[in-house]
Amino acid sequence: MSVTAPPEHLDAHGRAESPPERPPARARSRAARSPRRRRTLEVLLAYGLLLPSLLVFAVFVFYPLVRQIYLSFFLTPPFPGEPKHYAGLSQIQQVLTSHDFLNSLWVTVLFVLYTVPAGLVLGLLLAVLAHQQLRGIRFFRTVFSSTVATSVAVASVIFFTLLNPQIGLFSYWFGRTGQLSVLDDPRLALLAVSVVTVWQNLGLAFIVMSAGLQAVPDDLLEASRVDGAGPWTRLRHVILPMLSPTLFFAIVVGSILSLEAFGQIDILTSGGPLQHTNVLVYAIYDQVFNQNNQGRAAVMTVALFLITLVFTLIQIRLLERRVTYER
Amino acid sequence: MGRVALTRVTKRFGEVTAVSDITLEVEDQEFLVLLGPSGCGKSTVLRLIAGLESPTDGSIEIGDRVVNGVEPKERDVAMVFQSYALYPQMTARRNIEFPLKNQRTPKLERARRVEEVAETLELTEVLDRRPAQMSGGQRQRVALARAIVRRPEAFLMDEPLSNLDAKLRTQTRTELIELQRRLATTVVYVTHDQVEGMTMGHRVAVMENGVIQQVGAPTEIYDHPANLFVAGFIGNPPMNVLTGLPTSEDGRLAIETPGGGIPLTAPQQDAVRRSGATQVAVGVRPEHIRLDEDGPLRASVAVIEALGYENHVVCRLEDGQQVIVRLRAEVAAPREGDKVHLGAEPRRLHLFDATTGARIGT
């Protein structure tokens, strides 16, 4: 648009924006007389504004949730169209005590333990490094956060190649060329998948931690320097306490991400070898799409939902007390 | 020895020169105030002494050693920040104790010194509270306690009173002065508040644009400002300044201002002649102007500001320039709109070269 062009749209806009009309005097006085009526209107307005997101949630979250709970009470046929049979609690009990489910649960717990703390520590480390005022640090900030722009699939394929027993660089470095692939080794497969996951989530962890570090007030850091604190004391007594809301956020989000992990397992190991990477989400997928057993899958889904819920509630109860400091 | 000395110190941030070629010596047990408007570089000077910034040029000494390149914690100075910079997750006790812990002071000794300082500053009651549970005044005292407990060579204070309300500020000001005299320790105190500058310091260093304009006792700075900036910055209401051309009549020099010609004493005439100033700024403090039938300046009274103990008579010269006259409450004030004549004893006049701002004569 040329600079000299008359601001026609502004004029039109300005004219269109006539001052809001005041409600008729009678309506105003009625509203003033009846606070209950005004409150009702306010509630209606609130629900009206919430409606679009409620609809989306209803279709994609609430209905599937209810449907899964419902399905978990039924034995479902392996072929579509055949009738399902009500099984009550028996299927739930059977699934929850099955070796497969308990194995998946254990694998999932291990997977969270492998990925969350490591991701947190590495993210914090990179953030602290990138927080230094050094020449060329912007370049490294970009590099450190770059995995955010990679998808799980891309990350998995990269590592699949690196770990390839014939041509993989990692296999070469670790002297495993020509041997059994790490991804096929029951002792190492879950670790390998965890490494991929940590790497892929590192960008996010780095960005979150960097944002947290930016929020630590400079004068606190300077005061601690004058007060004689070395780098370690400063990290332990000044930075970490101020960072605790961020750490809390990262732990919760990281845990949920790990509980929900699917793509890397599907691409790298398909739950194997010998179920050693068969995390809950992959097991659910396997039940639905390979075993055609929707009922069993529903039980496991509800179980995963409850585990995530309880896990998050515990984290909130444990950590929230310690995380906020009013200055 | 709590002496602090800066020699030809310059600090540049990229293109910006925050502190320019400053030389300043703070004696042991002296209370020195760095006074200036915001952005004048006074906080940078403090941070240079603390070691939070390193000088681009020049040397800094604390005690008897040069501390350029020495880490803040090795400098044995304590700093009180404007925001107090208390660690929010620690109680007052742990905040105060923190520097001692870092020095690996034994536990018993630590507890004893914290109690001692807490008693001095009346903090015993709140020792187990966190900063969020304390009032602004208490937080300020905790910050002070954290500095005192170390018994450092020097205290550096960066506007420590500016977050307090007016009443508490006045009270704390007095307490700080008493504390400094009692502890007999060196203090470098940064403020933009001229009242703090005038009342607290043994000496005041007035800064502007990264340069120290004048260093001296408060009264010296008030009575003999070194230049127009200091003259205008110190004093409330500020000094009246009228600019005019030196004109000679029958061999006698006067300054021709819009309100009329201001006569000078013989020594003042000599000084103006020697200075070669083409434009002269004449400054007079409001308390030194008299309403005088024979005064050389014609003005009309615009507003009377009654403060109870005194009146500020705001006058306007013919060209609209403002002159403030300070009258004791018991002296009859003119009415608004009155035509008045203003005068002052010649020895009360401060003369400056209007171009350079430098003081002319004594």
Image (spheres, rainbow, N blue to C red):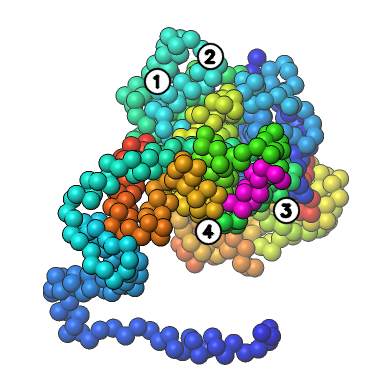
In the rendered picture of this protein, how many numbered marks are placed on residues?
Answer: 4
Q: Do labels 2 and 3 share a chain?
A: yes
Q: What residue type is labelled 2?
A: Arg
Res. B355 in view: yes
Image marks 4 and 2: residues in contact by CB distance under 8 Å: no
In percent of the image, x 47 and y 52: which residue is there?
A262
Image marks 4 and 3: residues in contact by CB distance under 8 Å: no
Looking at the picture, tell me which residue is in the foreground, B74 or B247. B74
Q: In this view, does A3 lie to the left or right of B166?
A: right
In primary-sequence order, the first of circles 4 and 3 is: 3
Image marks 2 and 3: residues in contact by CB distance under 8 Å: no
In primary-sequence order, the first of circles 4 and 2 is: 2
Q: Tell me the crowding category of disc 1: few under 14, some 14 to 19, or many 20 or more residues within 10 angstroms, Cα based.
A: many
Tell me the quarter of the picture where residue A98 sits.
Answer: top left
Q: Name the residue under label 1.
A: B118
- Tell me which secondary structure the magenta stretch mostly adopts: helix
Helix, strand or loop at label 1? It is helix
Q: Which amino acid does label 4 sit on?
A: Val
Q: Which chain carries label 3?
A: B
Q: In this view, does B250 lie to the left or right of B337?
A: right
Q: Name the residue under label 3.
A: B281
Q: Which chain carries label 1?
A: B
Percent x, y of residue B250: 83, 56
Percent x, y of residue A199: 58, 45
Q: In the image, which residues are magenta?
A: A155-167
Percent x, y of residue B330: 42, 47
Q: Mark 2 points at which residue?
A: B104
Res B314 label = 4
In percent of the image, x 50 and y 50: which residue is there?
A270
The alpha-carbon separation of the residues under discs 2 and 3 comes to 59 Å
Residue A158 lies in magenta, yes or no?
yes
